């Protein structure tokens, strides 16, 4: 929603509602068209490197939303955000399934979605408070959290190797 809100000031009248919706459609086109290729890529090279790529790209998308303020940049950023979502969304669940013993896969996925849902509320509250201060701060927050996720995935690899 913050991505859509960020674009509304560039449009007036009916376009203030319609154009952000079209950008969301663009996001979904990229998400739907790229989810399978990135799923196949994660099957070949592993979930962790693909998730690192996805979170790294999300850092760039958030920085882009913070720094750029034009229709052309937002079109590109919504397309990139669709790619980010295609990279991350299914691969999270696949990684949880890969890590869970066969007899507890459903429980592991349920716990994953519960933890994600519980983490979303405070994260959204923080982002909303930051939005009230300065919309750019919301995207700075997103980029910092995504960078922390990249660092955790890289550190997790080191821990598993040790």
Image (cartoon, rainbow, N blue to C red):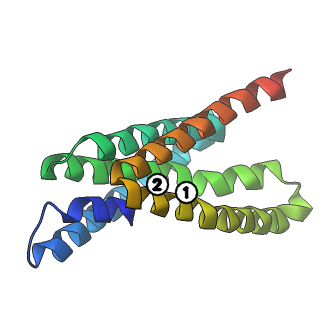
Q: Are marks 1 and 2 in contact (CB under 8 Å)?
A: yes
Q: Secondary structure at mark 2?
A: helix
Q: Position of residue 139 (x, y in %)?
A: 41, 48
Q: Position of residue 78 (x, y in %)?
A: 30, 54
Q: Is residue 86 above or below residue 2?
A: above
From the image, tell me which residue sits under label 2.
Answer: 85
Q: Look at the image and tell me whether residue 74 can be seen.
A: yes
Q: Is residue 15 above or below residue 153?
A: below
Q: Is residue 26 above or below residue 150?
A: below
Residue occupying the point 80% across, 48% down: 99
Q: Is residue 54 left or right of residue 103?
A: left
Of the 4 image quadrants, the one containing the C terminus is top right
The quadrant holding residue 7 is bottom left
User: In the current view of this chain or complex, which residue is farthest to the top?
Assistant: 162
From the image, tell me which residue sits under label 1.
Answer: 89
Q: CA distance from mark 1 to mark 2?
A: 5 Å
Q: Secondary structure at mark 1?
A: helix
**Label 2 crowd bin: few (<14), some (14–19), many (20+), radius 10 Å:** many
Q: Position of residue 83 (x, y in %)?
A: 39, 49
Instruction: Say which of 68 and 100 sits in front.
Output: 68
């Amino acid at each position: 929603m913050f991505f859509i809100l960020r674009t509304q000031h560039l449009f007036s009248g009916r376009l203030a509602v319609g154009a952000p919706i079209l950008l969301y459609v663009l996001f979904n086109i990229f998400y739907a068209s790229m989810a399978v290729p990135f799923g196949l890529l994660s099957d070949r090279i592993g979930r962790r490197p693909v998730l690192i790529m996805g979170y790294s790209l999300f850092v760039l998308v958030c920085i882009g939303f913070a720094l750029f303020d034009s229709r052309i940049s937002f079109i590109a950023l919504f397309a990139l955000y669709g790619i980010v979502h295609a990279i991350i969304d299914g691969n999270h669940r696949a990684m949880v399934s890969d890590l869970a013993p066969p007899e507890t896969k459903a429980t592991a996925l349920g716990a994953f979605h519960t933890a994600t849902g519980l983490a979303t509320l405070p994260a959204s509250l923080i982002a909303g408070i930051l939005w009230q201060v300065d919309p750019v701060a919301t995207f700075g927050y997103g980029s910092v959290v995504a960078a922390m996720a990249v660092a955790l995935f890289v550190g997790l690899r080191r821990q598993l190797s040790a």
